[in-house]
Image: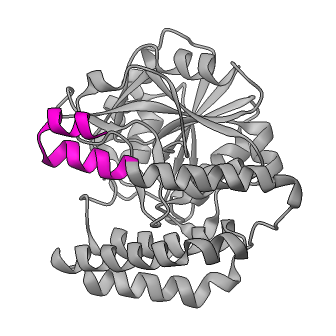
Amino acid sequence: MKATVVIPNYNGQRFVKTCLDALRLQSDRDFETLVIDNASEDGSYEYIKENYKEVKLVRLKKNYGFSAAVNKGIELSDTPYVILLNNDTEVAPHFVRELVKAIEKSEDIFSVSSKMINFNDRTIMDDAGDMYSIFGWGFQQGVGQRTENYTEDMEVFSACAGAAIYRKKILDEIGMFDLKHFAYLEDMDLGYRARIHGYRNLFCAKAVVYHVGSGTSGSQYNAFKVRLAARNNVYMIYKNMPFLQLAINMPFLAAGFLTKYLFFKRLGFGDEYREGFKEGMRRMHTLKKVRYDSRHLSNYIEIEKQLIKAALLYVRDYAKRHMDIELVNRLF
């Protein structure tokens, strides 16, 4: 087997049939499927056990969150590659084949993100790889844009772990998902760590998956998600930026955090964002910081360039969603 598809599941009864049926229809069968169940109470564990005998199924004692579930799946995998897949997805027939082909192109590729398309409107993008900006904003590249705009492979800051392939031996080298994240931004934190070590993260346009989005948390924005994302963003910056880079970026990061607070305050989640930020500041010292190594200096410089470029990309993508497309194309 070349790959193990690891699916974390928590109360995903309404999604798992579509997800697992699509995996049965894959053109490339050189993979196995492993579902890690976070103590579901909706019958989804029993349903998978009864109806999908080919699926390896592990049940955890309680809901340990996304990071712990996928780490358990990675630990149990003995294949060169691990594909992480959300349960609220439907993969296209060549999904596995295209991800494996993409990651096999070079030994320095750590992860490959798929072409995630809106499940309900399949002309609209959900994610073309994740980006991170100098303002401390992580965002889904291409979200809300037309699918035909994303037909070429490209380098991205990190892969979206909702549907991506990872090289297991690099995970063994740099470590797996940080359990203290529980959920949200754990994939970007991992992609950031890989880039520090000189590895690349790519987007593969031919690996197509249809994604419901927020299938477990329930909505795009909610109190739980806003608080954890704010906290985890502080964690990610503290862990991955050396002191000099942090000092250089601090004015931009401060402006970014303030802007985010005002945005969520307008949506009614200002208190949650503030509490998440405060928790991150209060507890960041408990995390394992990536030790600075002068041999990685060129990687840090390249990361800084990517943070600046991502800020411009964010502005461009935002403008495309809210302004005249032809005008934006001329400006950028």
Image quarter of the N terminus: top right
Question: Is 263 rendered above or below residue 52?
Answer: below
Residue visible at 61% across and 16% down in the picture? 101
Q: How many marks?
A: 0
314 falls in the magenta region: yes
The magenta segment is: 313-332
Q: Residue furthest top?
A: 27
Colouring scheme applied when the structure was drawn: one colour
- 208 on left or right of 38: left
Q: Residue furthest left?
A: 324
Residue 59 visible in the current orientation: no
The image position of residue 59, as x and y in percent, is 55, 52
Apparent side of residue 74 relative to residue 313 in the rendered image (left or right): right
Residue 240 position, x and y percent, is 67, 65
State the predominant SS element of the stretch in magenta. helix
Could one spot residue 270 in this view of the protein?
A: yes
Q: Position of residue 145 (x, y in %)?
A: 24, 36
For this rendering, which residue is in front, 14 or 53? 14
The quarter of the rendered structure image containing the C terminus is top left
x 23%, y 29%: residue? 146
On the image, the x and y values in percent for residue 324 come to 11, 40
Task: Examine the image and state in which quarter residue 286 appears.
Answer: bottom right
Q: Is residue 71 above or below residue 33?
A: below
